[in-house]
Image (cartoon, rainbow, N blue to C red):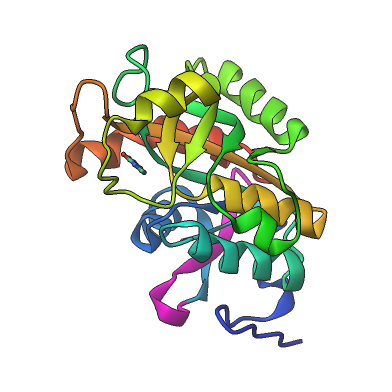
Amino acid sequence: MSTPTPHIDCHAGAFARTVLMPGDPQRAKYIADNFLQDVQQVNSVRGMLGYTGTYQGRRISVMGSGMGMPSIGIYSFELFSFYGVERIIRIGSCGAYSADLDLYDVIIADEAWSESSFARTQGVSDTDVLAATPDLVAELESHAQALHIDYVKTRIHSSDVFYRQNFDDYKTIRDQHGCQAVEMEAFALFANAQATNKQAACVLTVSDSLVTHEATTSDEREKAFTNMMQIALQMAD
Ligand code: HPA
């Protein structure tokens, strides 16, 4: 059966029950090429590459989300609503708001705070804090522990703006809203999981620090993200 949606063109069963979503479609390709077996490309509309394969014999898909809440909002809604996807785990990078976080630290987000109107506009929620699915958070934590990978579980900030003009705003967001790191997608993903009665979570790697101004190079990032990927790939089912 064919059920192409405006932004994904494949048949209904082409995706696994669980989808990992990095922001960068090239990262989706990298994961498929290096970690999955029996891989099939399942999307290339607008270059937003998606693949389905197996990891240790269990089925899993990986597809880019693009950057920002409107972009992940479109792809995650279509996956949840039209392709039988039950669980989406965002795997991405984040900026540290806390001096306690080092580059390459792994974060499992239990909540996202945002000033975004996404959840309200979607008709899901009027609150500015949305939770990841608790069962998925617990599963990710147990995989991290089994792999002996340290992680920090925290609330994160999902921001609409990367190049914020008032740079020091991050201190207020950290201190008043309890966000230890910033990225740009989780809040919309969590809203869509709620809208469609599905499950979502978010694992991140610290790629830069707003506190120390340290940043990783793209070369370093490729290797350092392996810890996060090992945790997320265990979700294959
Ligand atoms: N801001 C927003 N998103 C990010 C950042 C940042 O500093 N680093 C990685 N993703």
Quadrant of ligand 1: it is top left
Up-down: is 92 above or below 29? above
Give the side of residue 65 with respect to residue 214, left or right. right
Magenta region includes residue 26:
no
x then y, percent, for residue 25: 39, 63
Q: Residue at x 45, y 35 (%)?
A: 204
Residue at 29% across, 24% down: 103
Q: Position of residue 233 (x, y in %)?
A: 56, 41
Residue 189's place in the image compared with 1, above or below, is above
Residue 74 occupies quadrant: bottom right
Q: Which residues are magenta?
A: 44-57
Answer with left or right where residue 71 lies relative to residue 67.
Answer: right
Work out which quarter of the rendered image holds the N terminus and state it: bottom right
Name the one closer to the observer, 126 or 145. Answer: 126
Q: Nearer the viewer, residue 47 or 30?
A: 47
- The residue depicted at 75 percent of the width and 69 percent of the height is 81
Indicate yes or no whether the magenta region holds residue 47: yes
Tell me if I can see residue 170 in this picture: yes
**Residue at image location 36% in from the left, 36% down from the top:** 225
Front residue of 14/107: it is 107
Can you give x and y, in whole percent of width and height, for residue 91 in the image? Answer: 48, 44
